[in-house]
Amino acid sequence: MNITLPQHRSLRTTLALTGVALLLGACAAPQSPSTAAAPAQPAGGHGQSAFLGSYDGNRDGVVPRAEYDAIRKQRFEAGDTNRDGVLNEAEYVAEFEQRLKQQYFSEGRQPDKAYEGSIKQAHVRFAILDRDRDSKLSREEDLAVADKTFKSADTNGDGVVSRNDPPAEPRASGGNAAP
């Protein structure tokens, strides 16, 4: 079969456009084994709905401490790309951004001002979580904030976060951000 020059150009253009489309699709919807099993929505936020959406991995409406800890551990390990046992700021923000991108993609949204604000907030959150100011978030620092976050979400103290938990008492100023 002989291909003419116009057919060759058309085929080459089609293949190039297909490659670009596949590449853009892969960039827009990152899927790695470490994030595919973890709930992606919401990637951030405060309040009971955000907590349940982010940590109720099996979507049964309740988050026992073991489920919460497993997802936190999974996210920490996914973020630790250089496998040194700690997260630097770039790793911490990149893990969050991957979940945020997936959320935006699944909602059919493009990054916007709110997205940019969420990324800026992730940098601020890292600075707050890095208690010893060594530019590394250790697993111990992560566990300390995880414990505090879970206890504040489990307002009835039964070891499970669910819609049955009464609303949290309003805090004065300067509450902690949920990572």
Image (tube, rainbow, N blue to C red):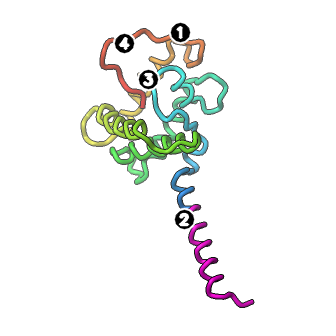
Circles 2 and 1: CB atoms closer than 8 Å:
no
Q: Is residue 52 above or below residue 14?
A: above
Farthest residue toward the front? 6
x, y (%) of residue 172? 32, 12
> Circle 1 — which element?
loop
- Label 3: few (<14), some or many (≥20) within 10 Å? some
x, y (%) of residue 12? 59, 77
The amino acid pointed to by label 4 is Arg
On whether residue 14 falls in the magenta region, the answer is yes
* Circle number at residue 20: 2
> Circle 4 — which element?
loop
Gap between marks 2 and 1, in whole Å?
50 Å
Eye-nearest disc, 3 or 4: 4
Residue that mark 1 sits on: 166
Gap between marks 4 and 2, in whole Å?
49 Å
> Circle 2 — which element?
helix
Name the foreground residue: 22 vs 166: 22
Q: Which residue does the image show at 41% across and 22% down from the upper left?
A: 148
Residue that mark 3 sits on: 149
The amino acid pointed to by label 2 is Val
The range drawn in magenta is: 1-22
Eye-nearest disc, 2 or 1: 2
Gap between marks 3 and 4, in whole Å?
14 Å
Residue that mark 4 sits on: 171
The amino acid pointed to by label 1 is Pro
x, y (%) of residue 14? 62, 71
Q: Which residue does the image show at 58% across and 74% down from the upper left?
A: 13
- Label 2: few (<14), some or many (≥20) within 10 Å? few
Eye-nearest disc, 4 or 2: 2
Name the foreground residue: 27 vs 146: 27
